[in-house]
Amino acid sequence: MDFKELINARYSVRNYLPRPVEEEKIMQVLEAARKAPSAVNYQPVKLYVIQKKENLDAIFACYHREWFKTAPMVIVVTGLHTQAWKRASDKKDHTDIDAAIAIDHITLQAADLGLGTCWICNFDAKKTAETLGLTPDEEPIALIPLGYPEGNKIPEKKRKTIDELTRWL
């Protein structure tokens, strides 16, 4: 689909069909994340693909919403702070920004393939890090459930107007 259609088709899916995602589609989603730009091309992002039932149950325990448990798989996006670019003038760490770009690529590629996602940040980061055995410099940034949406009605998007978002100088 063209880009305008794609950005309108992508939405936060909160119910999934109990249908596994084909490996070919998973690889396309991961490749989209891999191709995401990052500051100075440092790529301080790691993706954990969770599909096995016992691992899914452990990740589901990190975010207590029943709908989350309907996802047939989850991608946990982490950031590696020791590998990220830091701006010289104020030492701003760009890990979160680089991870956000990768996540956006994931969500858009998934939508283009007829898959649904939801960008989850309100999860237990400490429990997630323990579950995945992350090192102290690796931070879980987001949980991204991935699967086929139950139903296909795209909800109305509530967005600010261009005037509310823009200041012309």
Image (spheres, grey):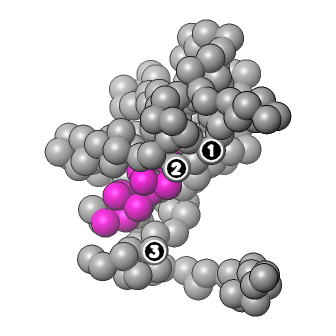
Q: Quadrant of the N terminus?
A: bottom left
Judged from this view, the residue extending furthest toward the left is 24
Tag 1 and tag 2, C-beta contact below 8 Å: yes
Q: Is residue 20 above or below residue 8?
A: above
The residue indicated by pointer 3 is: 7
Q: Secondary structure at mark 1?
A: helix
Q: Is residue 84 above or below residue 146?
A: above
* Front-lying residue, 65 or 3: 3
Dot 1, how many residues are within 10 Å of its Cα: few (below 14), some (14-19), or many (20+)? some
In the image, what residue occupies the spot 34% across and 58% down? Answer: 109
Q: Amino acid at mark 1?
A: Ile
* Front-lying residue, 18 or 166: 166
Circle nearer the viewer, 2 or 3: 2
Q: Is residue 41 above or below residue 32?
A: above
Q: Amino acid at mark 3?
A: Ile
Q: Range of the magenta residues?
A: 103-112
Tag 3 and tag 1, C-beta contact below 8 Å: no
The residue indicated by pointer 2 is: 101
The residue indicated by pointer 1 is: 97
Dot 3, how many residues are within 10 Å of its Cα: few (below 14), some (14-19), or many (20+)? some
Does the stretch in magenta take in 41? Answer: no
Where residue 165 appears, as percent x and y from the top left, is 75, 79
Residue 16 in sight here? no
- Magenta region, mostly helix, strand or loop? helix
Does the stretch in magenta take in 107? Answer: yes
* Front-lying residue, 51 or 87: 87
Side of 126 relative to 90 (left or right): left
